[in-house]
Image: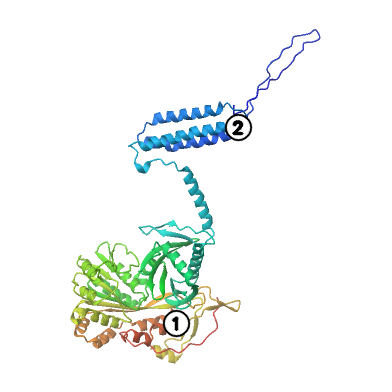
Amino acid sequence: MSMELVMVLAQTTGAEGSGGGSGGATVGKALWLVSVWKPVIFLIPFVAWAAIISKIYDKHAARFFLPRAAWNIGHLCAGIVAFAAAMLMPVAGIGGFFAGLGVLTLILAADIAAYAVVANRDERVPDEFHIKLDIVKKMREKKELKARAKLQSAVSLVIRKADAKGKFGELLQAPAPETPEYEARVAGEDVFKKALAARAAQVDFAPAGKDNQYSTSYLIDGVRTPGETLPGPLAVRVMDFWRAAAGLDVQDRRRKLQGTVQAEEDDTKTPIRVTSMGGQGGMRTTLLFNPEKAVIRKLSDLGLLDPQMAEMKKIVEEEKGLVLVASPPDGGRTTTLYSLTRMHDAYMKNVQLVETDPQAALEGARGNKFEAEKEGAEFSTLVRSVIRRDPQVVSVAELPDQNTAKEIAKADFERVRVYVGVRAESALQAVESWIKAVGDAPSAGKALHGVVAQKLLRKLCTNCRMSYPAAPDMLKKLGVPEGKVTTLYKKGGQVLIKNKPEVCPVCNGIGYYGQDSAFEVYEITAEDRELIASGNLEALRSALRKKQQPTIQQAAIRKAIDGTTSVEEITRITTPASQAAAGGGGGAGASAPAKAPQPPQPAAPKA
């Protein structure tokens, strides 16, 4: 037998006094001695077999109406046969033990396989519910998952892919160390972490133009800041890493591709929009952080002055006609367009958007994306189709050609409000661009009911900004009456810690933290539309000035007076050079200031 059985007979002998007596052998006790480890090993296949039968097979048979009772009796008989065969193995010693264990395991495995084969052939069991005997494969996969988890611990970011619905779930596993893929991931994570530490909203990879190198740059508070330079082969692998993580085709290096991915570190989750396209000298890739958060803001948070907010609400409440929303490239136009669109109740009204590159989904509004790669696709055709659906509010993100402008001008503006995004430096320049695009001043003027123009400016870091006396000549250049303002502010970048200058920990030494906007907001009245129809733009300029609404320059100066921004920042966004590059169209109010005198350099403030 496979088990060692030993009976020990203990004999006791008794004597009765000196007179003799009888004696005999009796059985004192019998001990069954079995090796402790042998029954434990025998239990292992029994426990596994019983778990499969009770937790999987029994439920499987009940679900598909198989002969459940008959199968359970069969399983029970198989278990008894397996046990008996192991116990009655006619081989002694350790060899008999392992022979019995092998026979037991074989019989139990045959029972498991028999049910799988028979059940899989039954017509009542659909193909997707066939039992697969891939235990070994699952064990191998489990081992691989553990290995991947170990690799994942070697990198600092958790990166999740987006599914078809845009939800982030699937984990992007780390490649094996000491491979080019692993090097690319480490370098890609490094660029991402440096960008976050610098408060960048965007990272761009572009050819450096020499020695097969790529440069990185960060967009911090709307200003481009140079980053590190990467060797060409490494830069391409880094870009491909982010492109693959976002679900893009890494082999396609020419077309414009866009996808999303999420990077997580500790409790911080950062959605990233990855955009790549071919360009002169090589591929370019952009990582845009928190894209929806950047463009979804309340109208009250955009930086409108009180009179401008009142004018804006009046324009929105009219709910008919065309409103131009203008800014330079990357000047906040999309954010303002979305904010104005959200002012209309999308659940009570038919609100639609037309965009080439949607930046966010607006709750309740229907988005219409222009697919430029489709054969015969035209933006103007899509706009015409949307307007013909009888919507009440339509927002068109851009004005790419004259045909689009002409289709918009044909709309029934007594029944629909249309917002159109245009590239312009000022409200008056936006009107000029609209007239030129339509090609007919009367048609252009008839449609127009409002113009909004803006420029983004940086806000001073309140932790390190420095005050200085407002000089009379500076106030004169800014158009501020002497004596009305005594103190202005400029960027710092340093604070005093224990009387020692240190880099400001809030703005990282930049001196600015966050962005604001300077606006022009004008309602276009019937009299203004007559001036536009007649082509008299100089008279329109005078009419806009009489509305007593702040121009972009005047709005920016007010923000400098209250300490929100600096005179240098006003100069940066309203220089004559930028206006000349845009075609010379100034704002409705005063022209941009000349270069402001530099303020004095006071000591760094204490932290």
Instruction: Say left or right for 370 vs 503.
Output: left
- Image: 310 above or below 165: below
Q: Say which mark, if any, is on residue 389.
A: none
- Image: 216 above or below 133: below
- In this picture the colour scheme is rainbow
Quadrant the C terminus occupies: bottom right
Residue 190 percent coordinates (x, y): 51, 67
Q: Say which mark, if any, is on residue 566.
A: 1
Disc 2 residue type (three-letter): Gly
Furthest-bottom residue in this view: 473
Residue 318 percent coordinates (x, y): 24, 72
Q: In the image, which is nearer the foreground, mark 1 or mark 2?
A: 2
- Closest to the observer: 25 or 38? 38
Label 2 neighbour load within 10 Å: few <14, some 14-19, many 20+: few
Secondary structure, mark 1, is: loop
State the image quarter where residue 25 is shown. top right
For marks 1 and 2, the one nearer the N-term is: 2
Residue positioned 56% across, 27% down in the render: 89
State the image quarter where residue 122 is shown. top left
Label 1 neighbour load within 10 Å: few <14, some 14-19, many 20+: many
- Closest to the observer: 420 or 158? 158
Instruction: Say left or right for 155 vs 32.
Output: left
Residue 188 percent coordinates (x, y): 48, 66
Secondary structure, mark 2, is: helix
Residue positioned 46% across, 60% down in the render: 159
Q: Is residue 259 visible?
A: yes
State the image quarter where residue 4 is shown. top right
Residue at the disc numbered 2: 95
Disc 1 residue type (three-letter): Ser
Asked if the residues shown at circle 1 and circle 2 are in contact, with their CB atoms under 8 angstroms apart, the answer is: no
